[in-house]
Image: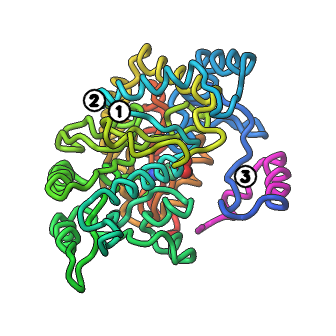
Amino acid sequence: MADESQTTETLGPEDSKWLGEYSRVHMNVFGTPLRVMDHGQGTRIWDVDGNEYLDFLAGIAVNSLGYAHPAWVQAVSAQAAKVAHTSNYFATEPQIELAARLVKLAGAPEGSHVYFGNSGAEGNEAALKLAKLYGRTLPGAAPEIGGKPARIIALTHGFHGRTLGALSATWKPVIRMPFEPLVPNIEFVEAGDPMALYEAFGQTGLGRYGKGPVAAVIMELIQGEAGVRPLGADYVAKVRAMCDANDALLIIDEVQTGIGRTGAWFAFQREDLSGGITPDIVTFAKGVAGGFPMGGMIAFGEKLSALFSPGTHGSTFAGNPLAASAALATLDVIEREGLIANAEARGEQLRQGIMASDNPLFEYVRGRGLLNAIQLTHPCAHAAMDWALEHGLIVNAVAPDALRLAPPLIVSERDVDEAVAILAGIPNDLPND
Ligand SMILES: *Cc1c(COP(=O)(O)O)cnc(C)c1O
């Protein structure tokens, strides 16, 4: 954090008071929060001192409908008044309806099944466990004939969550290494390099140096936490082909990219991100329930889905009716209000506006739909984020040299113009991170 004093000086009295109290009782895993927020409406949120912000982060691509969307509030309130939780000894209509809806939106074949969890990490935990069960069915992995455990391949710069399993597939050394040893037989290959992947697959074999077969590759199509970096359709198509040739699963982590964020229901449905491939497993979370904690996975096809049976996985809150109702309302509004098309159009407007602003701090802008990042000409992202916040715009320093922009899918043309005007004014002489 380059210049904390600059932010602190303009913090209001209520914010300062609450932030002091926050630090006294919260574990310091997030650093000091920027503000203490009070309430939101649409694309705006207000802090406890009454300052208004235009929100171009949306709770990290979570608040798809912005704040307090009437249809969402109505759905959650009505469900809370009916039944909020049952446990999985019982089912509720919203979760059944939601699972069917997600299978359909993903274009998954008949026989595909959904598992619900409560976060992105949990969606990925489920996917990794399913991949492990799948790995045991591969020739050469069977322990009873001296087989070698199947491997899972993850990519450099990939992010899949903080729980121990998901963390094992998360690349960033500073967040992973303090917790090693983690789940074994997960390997990293260089993202975007098909030869590296080819080599990793080729190490399979029964010889002394041979490794177990590859059960799965797990990857994002746009590496969000790495700075909103699309991997490229050609590369993704090659990964799919290599998985096919080796009977390995392809797990696409759409926790950040899914549910309309990139201008399609799922990023894999965008030819220009995926090369038109179909995944075996898709994980989702962030945007799915419009601000309610929910995540999960869709397993494509009957055979794969059937590897999970009673006892193999679960969670008390999984498929909670309150979360499911929030998600159904979110999907309804996205459909009814044409928010996928809006994500595409507003994203285009945003990227063009940023480049036309001629701010010398901006090198270029990358992303799809409403998941974008501005590449900065020098690494002052934290100071730039603070400056924007002081000027009423929430953006995110996703990397020292990149600002992430992920507004709600309801963002209007005027909101985008307003954000671009603020971004255009970010000074070029801010201190580096
Ligand atoms: C945010 C994110 C996760 C983790 O989700 P949590 O809800 O924080 O556990 C996993 N994968 C990707 C791609 C993400 O962006």
Foreground of the two, 245 or 46: 245
**Residue 414 in sight from this viewpoint:** no
Tag in front: 2 or 3: 2
Numbered-mark total: 3
Residue drawn at (78%, 40%), measured in percent from left and top? 49
Foreground of the two, 185 or 331: 185
Q: Main secondary structure of the magenta part?
A: helix
Q: Position of residue 17 (x, y in %)?
A: 85, 52
Image-quadrant location for residue 341: top left
Q: Earlier in the sequence, mark 1 or mark 3?
A: 3
Checking the image for residue 109, the label placed there is 2
- Check if residue 273 falls in the magenta segment: no
Residue drawn at (40%, 38%), measured in percent from left and top? 298
Checking the image for residue 80, the label placed there is none
The residue indicated by pointer 3 is: 10
Instruction: Tell me which amino acid carries mark 3.
Output: Thr
> Which element is circle 3 on?
helix
Label 2 with label 1: CB-CB less than 8 Å:
yes
**Residue 329 in sight from this viewpoint:** yes
Instruction: Tell me which amino acid carries mark 2.
Output: Pro
- Magenta segment range? 1-22
Checking the image for residue 112, the label placed there is 1
Decide: is 126 above or below 88. Answer: below
